[in-house]
Image: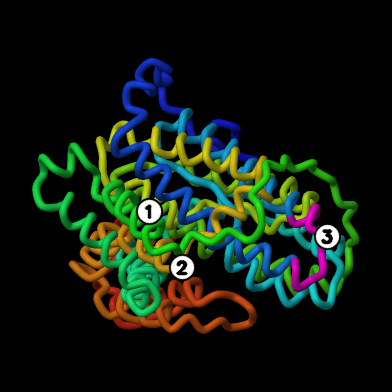
Amino acid sequence: MASKQSIIEKISRPLPRIADVLLHAFGHNLVNGFSAFLFAATGPGAMTLAIGTAAKLPFDQIAVWMFAGYSLSGVLTVFVCYLYRQPFAFGYSMPALVIVGPALLQLSLAEMVGAYLVTGVLILVMAFTGFIRRATRALPEPIVMAMVAGVFMPYSLRMIDAFETGVWVAGAMIAGYLASSASLAMQRRFPPLLSALVAGTIATLATGQFSPVGDITMQVVAPVVIRPDFNMNAIIEFVIPLTVTVVGIHNTQGFAILRNAGYRPPENLSTLICGGGTMVYGVLGCVPTVVTGPANAILNVSGDRDWRFVGGIWFGLFFILFGLFAPSALQIGVALPTAFIATLAGLAMIPVLQSAFVSGFGGKFPLSALVTFLTTVAGVSIFGIGAAFWGLVFGCAVARLVERRDFAEGDAPQ
């Protein structure tokens, strides 16, 4: 077995001083951290509520599910951001929600918990055997970035769709974003996303589109552990799709975004965390732990690269609070108009899409990158596994067949 040093990447030393973290805690880092949080909390939170309600789970159990997905992810995020000085965010898998949702109409939550635990063990085995590092080295960067572009493209398209349902909110946010982007001096004083958030909030309140259901009261979650039921049918049907969702879709995106931003993400440690986290989340009823691609992207849209990890710490702290007060926080999140969330996500993705297109289509593997992009954008699942994974598979197959000349010595498949 490999030594401990070869399994877990070395932390970044010296560790940042708390005084320096506080010095860089505002401006771009606060705005990016809050924007990433708002994006990651509202959509998945509402989807979790919808799936849990459809499965007739008690509201208290849904709240525990959200506590695991948010508060525990927040703790992991703060931990890794601080130790590795990178804007590195953890969360839970939305594609897994899509997979699990229909299953909960047929299977009990305890049976799904059994599948989650087996999934966590399989991810841990992949990390301990070094599979993740070998797989990462075998994937050409242009193909991975084309997959990232395909995954994030729908967010920008939804921003355009937002004009149909909320023209004043979407228009105000885009106007605010463009106003702050007019000059570098303006961007430093007023980050574009901050201007978009302020303009969108004013437009939302002015048009009366903030509409919470019932009175908003402060409620704290009381975690309850679920005893697993190891149903072989559930294990056979769901372990592989859930594992591929974590390792082949989410984590691959998150790592690629960080590498493209100039970091060296702790890939093996993150995979170990996702494996162990999936088991802990699982006994609380939550779907697997993942590295979040969209949140990592938003955390990297602006600011001093050496201190962007502070934005990740903000993201983690917001997640912790959201999970602790999940019932109340979700009331606020779902009360925001869809145009607000869609426009915020679209604006946050603009720099990421620009970078992904340049990296994916600016050099080697042009045909492979195009195949990857088109497959991912199409969004078709095969055998219950999402399109982003198949985009990588088909793109790499094309590269091996017709673009082998583009494999430099360092890019050759291992």
Which residue is labeled 1 in the image? 201
State which quadrant residue 263 falls in. Answer: top left
| Secondary structure that dominates the magenta span | helix
Q: Mark 2 belongs to which amino acid?
A: Thr
Instruction: Decide: few, some or many residues near mark 3? Use Cα within 10 Å; few <14, some 14-19, many ≥20.
Output: few
Q: Is residue 402 magenta?
A: no
Earlier sequence position, callout 3 versus callout 2 = 3
Q: Is residue 97 left or right of residue 176?
A: right
Q: Mark 1 belongs to which amino acid?
A: Thr
Earlier sequence position, callout 1 versus callout 3 = 3
Name the residue nearer the viewer: 401 or 268: 268
Q: In which quadrant will I find the N terminus?
A: top right
Q: Which residues are magenta?
A: 53-62
Determine if residue 269 is in view: yes
Residue 338 is marked as 2
Q: Is residue 170 left or right of residue 255?
A: left
Q: Is residue 266 left or right of residue 297?
A: right
Q: Is residue 199 above or below residue 186?
A: below
Judged from the image, the secondary structure of the residue bearing numbered disc 1 is helix
Q: CA distance from mark 3 to mark 2?
A: 26 Å
Which residue is labeled 3 in the image? 58
> Is disc 3 in contact with disc 2, using a CB cutoff of under 8 Å?
no
Q: Residue at 36% of width from left, 79% of height from top? A: 164
Instruction: Decide: few, some or many residues near mark 1? Use Cα within 10 Å; few <14, some 14-19, many ≥20.
Output: some
Q: Residue at 32% of width from left, 72% of height from top? A: 167
Q: Residue 191: where, in percent of width, then height?
A: 24, 44
Q: Residue at 58% of width from left, 68% of height from top? A: 95
Q: Is residue 56 magenta?
A: yes
